[in-house]
Image (spheres, rainbow, N blue to C red):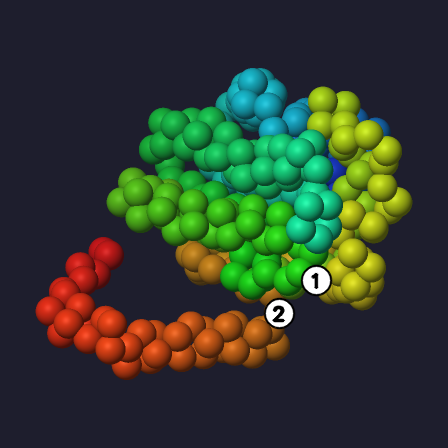
Amino acid sequence: MKDLAGKTAFVTGGASGIGLSMARAFGREGMNVVISDVDADALAAASETLAQEQVRVASVQCDVADRASVQAAAQAALAAFGKVHLVCNTAGIAVGGTLGEVRQADWDWIFGVNVMGVVYGMETFAPLVLSHGEGGHFVNTSSMAGFLSSPGLEAYAATKHAVVALSEGWAPQLAPRGVGVSVLCPHFVRTRIHESERVRPERFAAGEPRQDGASVGSTAGQGVLAGIDPDIVGARVLEAIRGDEFYIFTHPQARILLQGYYANVMAAFDKAEASPVLRTVVKDWSLPIPG
C-alpha cells in the first residue's frame, strides 16, 4: 500500500503504546482510523487525543481473545467508514515465570490474546479486505522474542514465535490477491506491557494478582522502561507498509543477537552432517525446498 489517504485502518491495542502510535502515524497520512482496546477508559482517552490531533477516528471496545468481540468490532469499523484496508493486530500482553510458575490462567490468557487475537483478526478481516478489491495490508505484531527466548519469558516468546510462523504462511496466500502481510518484530519499546495485569479480564483470573512487572521479570521490565519511543515504531511501520516489507525490525543493532542464534543453528547442522549415525541419510535423502 502506497496511497493511504482516505483509506481506513483498524488497530487493536490502539489505546496506548505501539497501537496508539500506529494510529497516530496513519491518521497523519489522511487515513480514517478505528482503534480498539479492551481498556474502555484508555480507549476513550486515546480517541479524544487523536481527534484533537485532527485524526478522523472511531473507537470500539474489543477483547481480541474473543472471536465474537473481534467480529463485532469489525462491523463497527464498517459502520463507521464503510471499508477497511489496513489491519494491525497489535494487542498483546506479557506474563512469565520459571518452569512450573506460569499458571493455567496465564497460559490461557497469553495465548488467547497474543496468538488467537491475531488469528481472529486475520480470519475476520481478510474477507472484508479482499471483498472491496482495492488492496490492503495486515501488520501482525510479534517481537524479537519471536526469534529468541530467555528463561522466565518462555510463554511470551512461544506466542511471538507463533505470530512469526503464522504470518510467514499467510503472506504468500494473500500476496497474489493484492494484500500484503508484515510481521512487526520490535525490541524494547516504552510501552506498558510490563503492567499487563491491569487489563486481565475476569475470565482469566488466576488467584492472587501479581505485582506490576513481576509477571515479566524485573530485567524485562527495566528494558521496556528504557525502550524507544512508540512513535518511532509507528513511523517505522508506516514506512514498511509503503515498502511492502515483510519483517519489520525497529532495532538494527539487534542483528547481532540473531547472528549468534543462527550461528549456533548452523553449528548444530555441521554436527549432524558429521554424525556417523546420519551418514547414509545425508548422502541419500533429498529434501524438498519450500516454495
Total labels: the figure holds 2
Q: Where on the picture, by quarter, is residue 40?
A: top right
Q: Is residue 64 left or right of residue 283?
A: right
Q: Which mark is residue 33?
A: none
- What is the x, y in percent for residue 156? 63, 49
* Residue at image coords 85%, 41%: 210
Amino acid type, residue under disc 2 in the picture: His
Residue bearing the label numbered 2 = 251
- Left or right side of 211 for 115: left
Q: Residue at x 86, y 33 (%)?
A: 208
What amino acid type should be assigned to the residue bearing mark 1? Phe
Left of 35 or right of it: where is 84? left
Q: Residue at x 53, y 34 (%)?
A: 116
Q: Position of residue 38 (x, y in %)?
A: 72, 29
Q: Is residue 257 above or below residue 236?
A: below
Find numbered disc 2 in the image and state the secondary structure of the residue it sits on: loop
Residue 229 found in image quarter: bottom right
Identify the image quadrant of residue 281: bottom left
Location of residue 215 with respect to 108 vertically, above or below: below
Q: Label 1's element?
A: loop
**Residue placed furthest toward the left:** 284
Query: Which residue has dot 1 on it?
Result: 188
> Vertically, is 123 above or below 162?
above
Residue 252 position, x and y percent, is 58, 73
The residue sitting at 76% across, 28% down in the picture is 205
Residue 218 x/y as whole percent? 82, 59
Residues marked 1 and 2 touching at CB (< 8 Å): yes
* Mark 1 vs 2, N-terminal side: 1
Estimate how packed mark 1 is, as few (under 14), some (14 to 19) or many (20 or more) residues with alpha carbons within 10 Å. many
In 3D space, how far apart are the residues under numbered discs 1 and 2 (Cα atoms)? 9 Å
Q: Is residue 105 visible?
A: yes
Front-lying residue, 245 or 216: 216
